[in-house]
């Protein structure tokens, strides 16, 4: 079999076989709808990504401050400077006052 | 008043996705015709065309307007079709023993009475489709563009993103690959 000739004839047949250019009904509407949903999803992704970054940053800051508070010897807590004690006193001041009145 | 292509593109880039619709409507016939060269099933053709338009939308900010939009889109279409071929290589595994009767008759006539072949062009079209399905993705792409669509090497280089020497090398290899497939087909049929 003459393969070169066969190849030539088949390629010539391929050249005459022009594919159709018909487009499915409302194809452009489908693409527009897909794009709209994609844009919405992308916006949502932006928010999600931003919030995740913020959460990670907050966690890192918390860990750093926690480590600093735990290991820094200069911040040894005295009763007078105890922030948590002061906060508690302030918050419970009204309760203490009412106890004293009684 | 109908908006120009440049106006539509500018509107899309400003965030008006609906302005993309006239572009899809205008160029889809060309996109579909190109996709049908590389995929047989209509569902696959639709998937590729959809992929082309989604890519075109997401990459539109990179369109500088130096070349016509159509050229830019066709480059994207050809490259998406090539990706499709690379992703569907398993189709090449089938053998030639499944040749249909018209295809088999056409081959017999080629061997015995080559002068009568013109009467059976449909069988030849089926046969070339079958041979193309068996080519490797780069070979199929380059044979389609060079031999079937009759494009120049330079055009193919622009469409595919390959260099001109690479197109030439791949075209040489593709012709050899095609001849090997034809030889295999002849062996399976006549031996």
Image: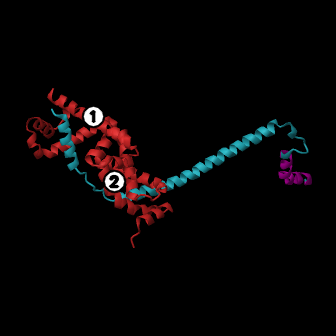
Taking depth in this image into account, of A39 and B45 the one nearest to the observer is B45
**Chain A colour as displayed:** cyan
User: How busy is the neighbourhood of tag 2: few (under 14 within 10 Å), some, or many (20 plus)?
Assistant: many
Residue for point 49% across, 56% down: B61
Is residue B138 something one can see in this rendering?
Answer: no
Q: Compared with residue B97, is residue B159 higher up or lower down, i.e. above or below? A: below
B67 lies left or right of B118: right
Looking at the picture, how far across and down is residue A44, in whole percent? 54, 53
Residue B70: give its label. none
Q: Compared with residue B107, is residue A96 higher up or lower down, i.e. above or below? A: below
Taking depth in this image into account, of B60 and B45 the one nearest to the observer is B60
A79 lies left or right of B151: right
Q: Compared with residue B189, is residue B146 higher up or lower down, i.e. above or below? A: below
Residue for point 69% across, 43% down: A59
Farthest residue toward the bottom?
A: B1
**Coloring scheme of the render?**
by chain
Residue for point 45% across, 62% down: B9
Which residues, given as a range, are shown in magenta? A84-101
The residue under label 1 is B176
B4 lies left or right of A71: left
Name the element at disc 1.
helix
Magenta stretch, main secondary structure class? helix
**Chain B colour as displayed:** red
Chain where mark 2 sits = B
Q: Compared with residue A54, is residue A75 higher up or lower down, i.e. above or below? A: above
Chain where mark 1 sits = B
Q: How many marks?
A: 2
Q: Nearer the viewer, mark 2 or mark 1?
A: 1
The residue under label 2 is B31
């Amino acid at each position: 079999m003459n393969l070169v000739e066969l190849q030539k004839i088949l390629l010539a047949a391929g050249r005459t076989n022009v594919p159709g250019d018909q487009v499915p009904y409302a194809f452009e509407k489908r693409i527009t709808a897909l794009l709209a949903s994609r844009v919405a999803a992308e916006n949502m992704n932006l928010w999600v990504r931003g919030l995740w970054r913020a959460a990670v940053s907050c966690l890192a800051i918390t860990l750093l401050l926690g480590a600093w508070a735990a290991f820094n010897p200069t911040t040894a807590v005295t009763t007078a400077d105890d922030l948590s004690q002061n906060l508690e006193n302030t918050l419970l001041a009204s309760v203490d006052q009412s106890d004293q009145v009684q | 008043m109908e908006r120009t292509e440049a106006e539509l593109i500018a509107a899309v880039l400003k965030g008006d996705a609906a302005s993309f619709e006239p572009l899809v409507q205008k160029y889809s016939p060309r996109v579909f015709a190109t996709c049908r060269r590389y995929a047989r099933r209509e569902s696959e053709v639709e998937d590729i065309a959809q992929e082309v338009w989604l890519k075109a939308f997401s990459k539109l900010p990179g369109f500088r307007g130096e070349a016509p939009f159509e050229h830019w889109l066709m480059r994207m279409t050809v490259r998406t079709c090539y990706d499709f071929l690379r992703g569907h290589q398993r189709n090449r595994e089938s053998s030639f023993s499944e040749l249909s009767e018209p295809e088999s008759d056409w081959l017999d006539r080629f061997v015995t009475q080559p002068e009568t072949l013109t009467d059976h062009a449909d069988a030849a079209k089926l046969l070339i489709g079958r041979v193309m399905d068996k080519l490797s993705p780069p070979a199929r792409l380059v044979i389609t563009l060079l031999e079937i669509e009759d494009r120049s090497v330079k055009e193919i280089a622009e469409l595919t993103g390959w260099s001109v020497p690479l197109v030439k090398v791949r075209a040489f290899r593709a012709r050899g690959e095609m001849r090997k497939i034809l030889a295999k087909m002849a062996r399976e049929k006549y031996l």
